[in-house]
Amino acid sequence: MNRLENKVAIVFGAGPNIGGTIAHFFAREGAKVVVSDQNADAARETTEFLASRGFEAVDAAGSALLEEDVERIVETAVERFGQLDAIVNMAGKIHWSSILDMKLEEWNEALPSFPTAGMLTTKHAARAMIKTGRRGSIVHILSTAAHFGEASGAAYTSAKAALLSLARSAAMDLACDGIRVNTVTPCGMEHNLWTMMHDEVFNPDFRPPDRPSFYSRDDYLKNIPLTRFPRASDLAWAAVFLASEESSFCTGIDIPVDGGLRHKYPTWRPGDHARTNINDYVRSIRKTAYGEECEPLFPSND
Ligand SMILES: NC(=O)c1ccc[n+]([C@@H]2O[C@H](COP(=O)([O-])OP(=O)(O)OC[C@H]3O[C@@H](n4cnc5c(N)ncnc54)[C@H](O)[C@@H]3O)[C@@H](O)[C@H]2O)c1
């Protein structure tokens, strides 16, 4: 409690999954939060949720890819709360395609999206932090895609790797003003199992048409030493740490929130360490919104 007391934060990309959970955890820790999303309904919903819990929050719809929107959203924070101490950004467009089939227009849309949102949010937040005399913290959400090659993932991996490089360089530009820039890297998230990956899990013959070199969720789970997928709350705790004074001497770092996925020795043998079955795993998880359990996925099994 109170780890972010007297701080003002903006979350860019604040629907009910990762961004909304981060906004909720920031508010619970005492921050006043500007909730921003390109989807105005998502921003409003998250703000209403926070207000229903008695937290001070304001919604500011807009795209983190448009400079005039980012400027306006940052101004909203400063006008409303008088300062800016932290931002978390996760905006961008994910695109999957084999390099053999990559269409130039899709590449041109997907590749700059994450680093452009990263550049614009960092630039305008840092200017506002300097103007309001705050030694702030900037956090960008990456993906394991930033650190590995992935079949059919050239656009996404390039975009997230560019965001990683942007964050490290911005950390160097802004260190003299006491502003820190760090990243958080999740692997495939648990909430994707509820919806888009549901068929993957329960249909053994499932193959996504656009990803021939497909790995199953069971393969993925067996490669995570802690034997589960990250939850939005796992990312939110990392973001709270990076936004708080607890990390005041950390800049240019990346926190992997991946259950050990990225740091295994190459001789790791998938599945040897634990016998978790993906079907049992999915049946055991709970659906959450804003980091709170909201309904069981399979009520009949309860
Ligand atoms: N879901 C996963 O398995 C996973 C894994 C690794 C990394 N990530 C990263 O986490 C972040 C969030 O993922 P998620 O699963 O919560 O996605 P999501 O689609 O549930 O949430 C993303 C939110 O960002 C908003 N958004 C997208 N582009 C925007 C823009 N230009 N301006 C403002 N808002 C914008 C969307 O409207 C949405 O509300 C992304 O950066 C994604 O790359 C997700």
Image: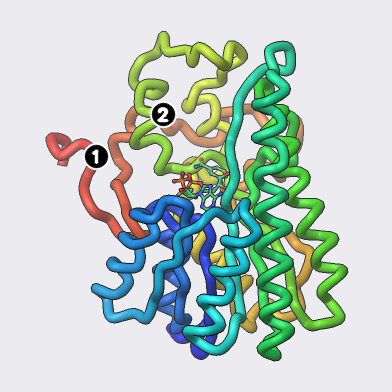
Q: Circle 1: is it few (<14), some (14-19), or many (20+) Cα within 10 Å? A: some
Residue that label 2 marks: 197
Q: Which amino acid, by three-letter code, is at mark 1?
A: Leu
Q: Residue furthest top?
A: 205
Looking at the image, which is closer to me, 255 or 122? 122
For image coordinates 48% across by 26% down, the residue present is 218
For image coordinates 63% across by 71% down, the residue present is 242
Instruction: Tell me residue 65's x, y (percent).
Output: 62, 51
Quarter of the C terminus within the rendering: top left
Is residue 220 depicted above or below 74 in this figure? above
Q: Which amino acid, by three-letter code, is at mark 2?
A: Met
Q: Circle 2: is it few (<14), some (14-19), or many (20+) Cα within 10 Å? A: some
Residue that label 1 marks: 297
Instruction: Tell me residue 107's x, y (percent).
Output: 70, 28
SS label for mark 1: loop
Instruction: Tell me residue 261's x, y (percent).
Output: 63, 41
Q: Is residue 122 left or right of residue 230?
A: right
